[in-house]
Image (tube, coloured by chain):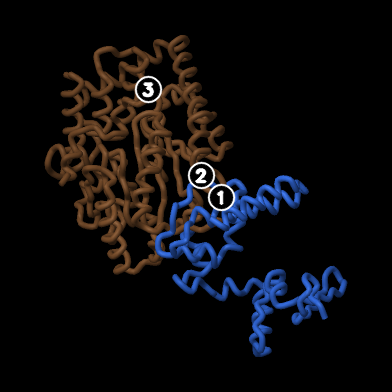
Amino acid sequence: MKCDNCNKNATVHLTEVQGGKRVEKHLCEQCAQQAEGIPVKSNMPINELLTNFVMAHSGLQKEAGTGCEQCGITWTEFRQSGLLGCQHDYTVFEKDLTPLLQRAHENATHHLGKVPARRGGSGVPMKRQVDLARLRKELAKAVEGEDYERAAKLRDQIRQAEAS
Amino acid sequence: MMKINDLTSRAGEWLRGNGPMSEIVISSRIRLARNVCGFPFLTRCSRHQRQQLESSVRETILGANIAPQVLYVDLEAAPEVDRNLLVERHLISKPHAVAEGARGVAVAENETISIMVNEEDHLRIQVLRSGLQLEEAWEQINKVDDQLESQLDWAFHTRFGYLTACPTNVGTGIRVSVMLHLPALKLTSEIEKVFRAAKEMRLAVRGLYGEGTEATGDFYQISNQSTLGKSEDDIISDFKHVVIPKIIEYEHIARRTLLSDKTVALDDKVARALGVLRSARLIASEETLLLLSHLRMGVHMGRVKDIDMRTINELFLLTQPAHLQKLHGRKLDGDMRRAIRADYIRQRLGGN
């Protein structure tokens, strides 16, 4: 059986009741994780799988105190103090932080403005990474808006940036 | 090596009162929140990590060639009066003065640059200039940020920008604040309109010492709140071309109204302020601020001719508790401070 979203093999089969109707979904591992928030590991014991499933669908995970593995802060602790514990939290809590950031920053979700010229330790030129991310986002927008002339230009710019 | 005592007797940059639009705009301030990769944010730092961070950041700042002379104050070791002195000069925040643990501040370029270490974020870089000088302030702080960035790895996220302990600062990490003196809007009861307009533009209005302080002496600080999704240039340009000119215009209109319709009431306010300042034997710092504010307005509106702005600007600063004690060379209790303050003001203003 093929996944509902892509062409991979479906290994996750969900049956949900939505508005009195039975809905079946067949997904591959990746789509299941993305769309349903169900972490899937092959050969996971059934009880662990069930626990994960219940947690993902009841919001229990946050209250149960799964926190950042680097600084240990949980979402609940952050909500109490208003201060995050380390830079990694922005990745760990990205999904929960987004609506909060939108409220605080007039609906903005992405940084615009200064970018450090380098990120020392990793040696990755930060500016290029951000430029690329921005170009790819603009490309997606151009394609969506069927502005193919602009899309072609952006594609060339991306190729150039990648090669540099 | 500069000492903290070198600061005491001169007026700080923000009160020099000589920048553009200085009759209404006291100062322009920009601060950048920055964190260093490899350390948790401060609430999650152990005592040891905090010390490590402070000493490594201190070393970097002192070695970064920011200015020919840099004063670094170890705030964990500094006496209370020195910490309060730095607050009065707007070089550190109140929370930074009273916090615990390893922390400090670097001050350079005639106090236009200050860098708080281990405040809410690892570094809070600030540039403070007299009058309306936002672009100059940005140019200066951007350079300091570049210099520090060449030595330190800032915590940065491709989507969220510069990462800060509080998500309300994330993105550019910038706070632009303009300190305004708006006595005429206050006297004509029009100040509420400014508050409402500022709120609509998503700007914060605060008092003389920033977050959580009341507006004393008709000084108001207007700052941006959004830091994500707008570039530094856009935020600054909004202030320079839209927000501040509008408020200045309102204050000018209010001053003209006072001059044309309420001349006697205006002169009464100014003369009473001068009368009390020249005669009082005991005076508290809040009352001093309020009266100096009226006097400042009187001088700018040409109602008082024999006092110069410089004297008033210096009095604003030197009559505050920590400065008074520092000038006097010892700790003074409240009553003594009020007496000494009154004496000092009478002497400077040629009183009875």
**Marks 2/3: CA distance?**
26 Å
Which residue is pictured at 61% across the width and 63% down the height? A95
Q: Would residue B300 be seen by someone viewing this image from the given angle?
A: yes
Question: For the point 17% across and 44% down, which residue is it?
Answer: B2
Above or below: residue B271 compared with residue B202:
above
Asked if labels 1 and 2 touch by Cβ distance under 8 angstroms, the answer is yes
**Which sits in the foreground, B152 or B51?**
B152
Distance CA(mark 2)–CA(mark 1): 8 Å
Q: Is residue A132 left or right of residue B303?
A: right
Identified by mark 3, the residue type is Glu
- Mark 3 neighbour density, 10 Å: few (under 14) some (14–19) many (20 or more): many
Which mark is first along the chain, 3 or 2?
3
How crowded pointer 1 is (Cα within 10 Å; few <14, some 14-19, many 20+) is rated as: some
Q: Which residue position holds label 1?
A: A104
Q: Is residue B65 left or right of residue A80?
A: left
**Labelled disc at residue B188:** none
**A63 on left or right of B35:** right
Judged from the image, the secondary structure of the residue bearing numbered disc 2 is loop
State whether residue B212 appears in this view: no
Instruction: For mark 3, give the secondary structure.
Output: loop
**Image mark count:** 3
Q: Which residue is mark 3?
A: B23
Q: Chain of mark 3?
A: B
What is the drawing colour of chain B?
brown
